[in-house]
Image: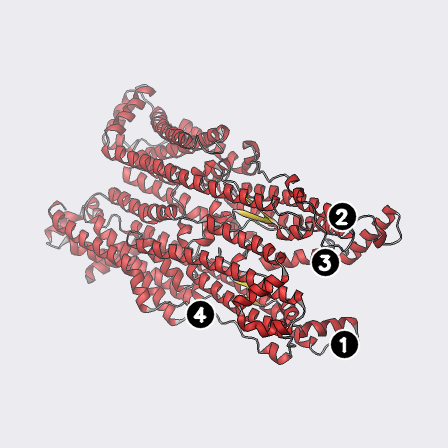
């Protein structure tokens, strides 16, 4: 029997099965519901943040004639834009802050994570399309594919296939292809609906990212289908195959993700907030090398200014010393913050490496991480936003300090103000999301394991199928 | 029944898979206890460091009351320590939420909420923008505590033990023999389920008792915890009793049970979570309160600010008459209004979050797993409401200190060692559950259990002839 005949036959059988049609129908309704519901949420969230950002910008540019240093203390708020693809995968969004307070002297982190206003229900996760695609559809694949070969064995048709000269490998290939094509079609349909529903969004879905997600999930379904059919081919009964696959599903989707995340946490524990603040404070005070106290730094800077301007004392400087000192302090603090926040980010990356490495044994790990990266909702996108917001903070604080220094005020004159239109000259914050290539930079291990899993599945079917015991 | 138990016991011992999975789950449970304990230990360690540093600051301040005023530095210390406001700046009072013993068993939201606050007057508990450092990926994955093992993994053990409780006899050819002997299959299955239920109960209770002992949990909370264990396990066995009553093959029953597990543990809770509304406007309001009020109030005309302040605090008028230093007036009024506004907004946000939690609890009748998790967390004082109560208490304590300091500042009263030591102490709010609360929380689980048992009985009666 040729490959195409088996594929068509398999599709026919599946369509005839009322349970399978019902389950697939329910999954489809569920996925459309999640897209519809998440689209509404994303729209609402985006609207709020855009409104808030515009309001804060208005406040910032409309603060009028104020002392620039007072304005640095009043600060400014920027808001993390909502990724349209969070309709598909909300990633870590519930656990990361949505706004960042930019002020003089200190670097803050994004605050007000939604999970902080929620009960522990938030720990059960959200019913999103990613949950359907990563967890529920694979379960459905297992329910359908566990009996792909055992059914043939139990109904004695396997012997007929083999007698007709169809090798077990062809049978396994045909069934794998038949089912994978169905899941990919289901996936394409869902992504098309998502694209249609978010077409009018302020930030339309990136085709490259959507294409990447399609490829990712297609590969994932191929792996699960191939393994399910192979387990079916190697099992004595459908029951055995089902129980083996269910155990693997639970292990991969429920147990391992939690175990690896906790293991990462144990292996590379983060600093406590007090430790971090102490270290920052010590470095600010004693210098980053511990031998450069802040008062000495200040004196050296004053001396360098006196020399540069060729004056006898700081009071004779033609510029406002306060502004220059504050900027000098900012520059030093920036080095301190880069050092310590860099350490925190490196530790988080190290913790996440445990999950990334687990993708060699757990396909769910790579699909979860790459999906979040492509949807722009992983922790690295959050770091990217925080980095860009911090760069913006440094620009506005420098602008304010320079206005204080060179704007025409005298040292010690804290009542001096800039003109009301000064604030309008400072550009607004605009977050630029990384390209697909940049977004996937942190997921090299996961991409490698995806490719390896696909290769492994192909090799197992090609070279392993015929070696399986036929057990007629 | 005795024969069934003896048979089941022999089967349990002879079958290598069952004891192995039991031991594996026991090992997983021990890891969960270790994980929870290490989390609590880290918190306790942080608290010790905070407390040590705080006590050291208090001692330093007390010593400054007798500072050597012949030196410039000593003079400055002496002046500052007698000034209530400056003294507060140097003291930087800290409060923390002492972890309950059960926290190590059910971490709840404790990794997602601040558990200590620096109550320096200008800080605000509702605007503590930066709680402990956490990895968002780890928060997403959740904690591997004992409540996770009981809620997520024990039902899987129950399914693995019981999915073939009816079909195994048929598949082994024993069903016919048992029928010939005239033994009721329902009685046999009930006996078997009871035995298997006991093995899972022993596991859950053993792990819980170990956790209770090593974490020094109070008797009442321990009893509440153990009671939840028993009911939750009985709830799952009642579902097994219902779904095995149809007498279908083991594989079909396993599929049904796993599907039910997916629905109860993944789909229903995640659906309710997706439907909850997070009000981003509220967060915007606190950002606004922090940025806007601060600037506006500070830039107000000093006289206008003082007059406005006296409208809300007329009892402080005498201090204002005494005080000539307008900077002090401005400082006190500024702090009052800023703190007042931030607290107003913050309490509003917390109150909305509590209302949301209470709305969600109404749906626990269709979300029994969350009802169980919620009760575990409440017993361990790690639920959102516990942190909100702590936050409110911290805010009230800060307000109490502020009033005292502001009065001293405005009246010109010098702080003395005695009055400093007589400052009020922070009292940890009590958020314990009553037996009635416990019972009400478990009603959804009990209802589910009852329905499953009734359905099971119904199917056993109607399908008796098929088996």
Q: Which residue has dot 2 on it?
A: A405
Residue at image coords 78%, 58%: A295
**Whether labels 2 and 1 share one chain:** no
Q: Which residue has dot 3 on it?
A: A285
Chain under disc 2: A
Q: Which residue has dot 1 on it?
A: B69
The span from disc 2 to disc 3 (Cα, nearest Å) is 23 Å
Residue at image coords 18%, 48%: B174
Q: SS for tag 3?
A: helix
Q: SS for tag 4?
A: loop
In the image, B433 versus A346, the foreground residue is B433
Which is more foreground, mark 1 or mark 4? Answer: 1
Query: Crowding near pointer 1: few (<14 within 10 Å), some, many (20+)?
Result: some
Q: Which residue has dot 4 on it?
A: B216
Q: Is residue A199 left or right of residue A407?
A: left
Query: Crowding near pointer 2: few (<14 within 10 Å), some, many (20+)?
Result: many
Residue A238: name its quadrant. Answer: top left
């Amino acid at each position: 029997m040729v490959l195409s005949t088996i594929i068509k036959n398999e599709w026919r059988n599946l369509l005839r099965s009322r349970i399978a049609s019902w389950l697939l129908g329910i999954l489809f309704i569920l996925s459309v519901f999640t897209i519809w519901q998440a689209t509404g949420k994303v729209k609402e969230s985006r609207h709020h943040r855009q409104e808030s950002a515009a309001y804060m910008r208005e406040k910032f540019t409309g603060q009028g004639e104020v002392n620039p240093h007072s304005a640095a203390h009043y600060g400014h708020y920027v808001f993390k834009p909502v990724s349209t693809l969070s309709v598909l995968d909300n990633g870590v969004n519930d656990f990361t802050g949505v706004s960042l307070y930019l002020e003089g002297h200190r670097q803050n982190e994004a605050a007000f994570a939604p999970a902080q206003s929620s009960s522990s229900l938030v720990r059960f996760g959200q019913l999103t399309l990613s949950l359907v695609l990563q967890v529920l559809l694979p379960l459905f694949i297992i329910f359908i594919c566990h009996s792909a070969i055992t059914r043939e064995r139990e109904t004695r048709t396997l012997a007929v296939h083999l007698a007709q000269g169809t090798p077990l490998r062809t049978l396994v290939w045909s069934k794998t292809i038949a089912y994978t094509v169905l899941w990919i079609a289901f996936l394409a349909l869902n992504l098309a609906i998502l694209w249609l529903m978010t077409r009018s969004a302020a930030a339309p879905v990136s085709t490259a990212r959507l294409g990447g997600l399609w490829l990712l999930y297609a590969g994932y379904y191929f792996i699960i289908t191939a393994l399910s059919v192979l387990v079916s081919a190697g099992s004595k009964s459908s029951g055995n195959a089902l129980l083996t696959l269910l155990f693997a599903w639970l292990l991969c989707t429920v147990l391992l993700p939690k175990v690896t995340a906790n293991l990462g946490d144990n292996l590379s524990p983060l600093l406590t907030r007090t430790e971090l603040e102490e270290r920052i404070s010590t470095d600010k005070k004693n210098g980053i090398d511990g031998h450069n106290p802040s008062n000495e730094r200040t004196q050296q800077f004053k001396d360098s200014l006196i020399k540069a301007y060729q004056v006898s004392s700081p009071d004779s400087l033609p510029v406002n010393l306060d502004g220059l000192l504050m900027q000098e302090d900012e520059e030093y603090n920036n080095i301190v913050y880069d050092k310590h926040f860099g350490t925190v980010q490196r530790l988080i990356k190290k913790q996440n490496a445990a999950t990334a490495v687990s993708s060699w044994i757990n396909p769910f790990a790579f699909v979860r991480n790459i999906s979040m990266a492509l949807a722009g909702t992983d922790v690295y996108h959050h770091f990217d936003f925080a980095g860009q917001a911090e760069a913006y903070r440094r620009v506005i604080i420098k602008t304010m300090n320079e206005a204080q220094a060179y704007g025409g005020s005298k040292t010690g004159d804290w009542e001096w103000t800039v003109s009301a239109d000064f604030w309008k000259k400072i550009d607004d914050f605009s977050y630029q999301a990384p390209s697909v290539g940049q977004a996937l930079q942190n997921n090299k291990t996961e991409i490698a394991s995806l490719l390896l899993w696909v290769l492994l599945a192909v090799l197992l079917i090609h070279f392993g199928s015929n070696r399986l015991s036929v057990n007629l | 029944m005795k024969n069934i138990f003896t048979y089941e016991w022999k089967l349990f011992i002879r079958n290598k898979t069952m004891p192995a999975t039991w031991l594996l789950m026991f090992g997983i449970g021990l890891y969960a206890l270790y994980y929870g304990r290490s989390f609590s230990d880290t918190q306790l360690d942080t608290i010790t460091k905070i407390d040590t540093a705080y006590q050291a600051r208090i001692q330093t301040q007390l010593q400054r009351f007798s500072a050597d005023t012949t030196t410039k530095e000593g003079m400055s210390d002496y002046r500052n320590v007698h000034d209530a406001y400056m003294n507060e700046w140097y003291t930087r009072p800290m409060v923390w939420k002492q972890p309950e013993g059960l926290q190590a068993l059910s971490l709840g939201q404790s990794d997602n909420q601040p558990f200590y606050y620096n109550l320096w007057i200008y800080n605000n508990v509702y605007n503590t923008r930066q709680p402990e450092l956490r990895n968002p990926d780890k928060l997403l994955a959740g904690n591997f505590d004992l409540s996770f093992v009981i809620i997520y993994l024990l039902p899987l053990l129950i399914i693995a033990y019981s999915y073939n409780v009816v079909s195994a006899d048929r598949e082994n050819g024993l069903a016919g023999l048992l029928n010939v002997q005239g033994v009721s299959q329902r009685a046999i299955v009930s006996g078997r389920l009871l035995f298997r239920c006991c093995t899972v109960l022993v596991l859950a209770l053993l792990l819980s008792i170990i956790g209770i002992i090593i974490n020094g949990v109070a008797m009442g909370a321990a009893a509440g915890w153990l009671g939840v264990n028993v009911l939750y396990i009985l709830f799952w066995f009642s579902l097994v009793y219902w779904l095995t009553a149809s007498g279908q093959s083991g594989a079909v029953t396993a599929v049904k049970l796993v599907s039910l597990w997916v629905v109860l543990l993944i789909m229903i809770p995640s659906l309710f979570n997706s439907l909850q509304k997070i009000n981003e406007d509220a967060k915007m309001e606190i950002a606004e309160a922090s940025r806007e009020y601060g600037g506006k109030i500070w830039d107000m005309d000093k006289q206008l600010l003082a007059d406005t302040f006296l409208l809300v605090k007329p009892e402080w008028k005498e201090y204002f008459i005494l005080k000539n230093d307008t900077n002090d007036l401005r400082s006190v009024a500024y702090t009052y209004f800023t703190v007042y506004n931030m607290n107003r907004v913050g309490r509003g946000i917390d109150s909305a979050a509590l209302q949301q939690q209470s709305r969600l609890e109404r749906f626990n009748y269709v979300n029994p797993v969350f009802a169980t998790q919620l009760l575990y967390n409440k017993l361990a004082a790690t639920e959102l409401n516990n942190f909100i109560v702590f936050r409110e208490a911290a805010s009230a304590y800060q307000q109490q200190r502020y009033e005292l300091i502001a009065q001293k500042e405005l009246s010109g009263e010098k702080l003395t060692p005695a009055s400093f030591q007589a400052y009020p102490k922070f009292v940890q709010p009590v958020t314990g559950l009553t037996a009635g609360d416990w019972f009400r929380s478990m009603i959804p689980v009990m209802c589910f259990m009852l329905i499953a048992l009734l359905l099971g009985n119904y199917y056993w009666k109607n399908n008796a002839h098929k088996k």
